[in-house]
C-alpha cells in the first residue's frame, strides 16, 4: 500500500511540474527569459516519473502495465484540474467524462486484483 501511495505522489509531483514547465511557460511567457531553467527542470521531473513507476511496479508485484495506466490517468486528472485553475478552461461534459474515466482507470487498477 505504501508503494502505491508514493507512486501516486511522485506521479502527481511529476505531472504538476511538467504542466507548469510546459503550459506555464505559455501562460506566463517565461520561455524567452528562462529557457535553460525550463529545460533543466526536466531532470528532477524525470526523477519523479522514474520513482513513480518504480513504486507502482513494487506495489503490483513486478507488473508494469498498471503503472502505465495509473500514470496516464494521473496525467489526465492533473491536466484537467490545472488547466481549469490556471487557464480558466471550462469543465464541459467531455472534460468531466474524461476526468471520470481517469478516476475509473485508477480505481480499476487499484481495486481489481
Image: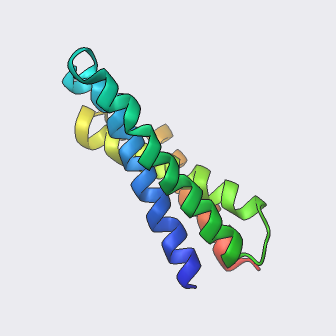
- Residue 23 placement (x, y as % from top left): 35, 30
To which quarter of the image does residue 80 belong? Answer: top left
**Is 9 left or right of 64, judged from the image as shown?**
left
Quadrant location of the N terminus in the rendered image: bottom right
Residue 105 in the image: x percent, y percent? 64, 60
Q: Looking at the picture, how far across and down is residue 67, in whole percent?
A: 67, 61
Identify the residue at image location x=20%, y=18%: 33
Residue 109 versus residue 46: which sits nearer the camera?
A: 46
Give the colouring mode of the picture. Answer: rainbow
Position of 91 relative to 12 (above/below): above
From the viewer's side, name the closer residue of 58 and 98.
58
Residue at 73% across, 77% down: 112
In-image side of 58 versus 9 (left or right) = right
The quarter of the displayed image where residue 32 is located: top left
Q: Is residue 69 visible?
A: yes
Residue 31 percent across, percent down from the top left: 28, 20
Near-viewer residue (65 or 102): 65
Q: Is residue 65 left or right of residue 20?
A: right
Front residue of this view, candidates 15 and 105: 15
* Residue at point 60%, 70% (across, down): 55
Quarter that holds the C terminus: bottom right
Image label count? 0
Extreme-top residue of the structure? 32
Residue at the outermost bottom position:
1
Is residue 99 in view?
no
Q: Is residue 90 above or below residue 25?
A: below
x 37%, y 46%: residue: 17
Amino acid at each position: 500500500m505504501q508503494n502505491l501511495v508514493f507512486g501516486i505522489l511522485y506521479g502527481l509531483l511529476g505531472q504538476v511540474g511538467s504542466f507548469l514547465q510546459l503550459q506555464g511557460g505559455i501562460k506566463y511567457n517565461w520561455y524567452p527569459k528562462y529557457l535553460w531553467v525550463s529545460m533543466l527542470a526536466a531532470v528532477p521531473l524525470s526523477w519523479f516519473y522514474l520513482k513513480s513507476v518504480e513504486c507502482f511496479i513494487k506495489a503490483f508485484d513486478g507488473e508494469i502495465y498498471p503503472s502505465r495506466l495509473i500514470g496516464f490517468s494521473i496525467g489526465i486528472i492533473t491536466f484537467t484540474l490545472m488547466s481549469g485553475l490556471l487557464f480558466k478552461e471550462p469543465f464541459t461534459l467531455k472534460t468531466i467524462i474524461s476526468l471520470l474515466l481517469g478516476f475509473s482507470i485508477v480505481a480499476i487498477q487499484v481495486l481489481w486484483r
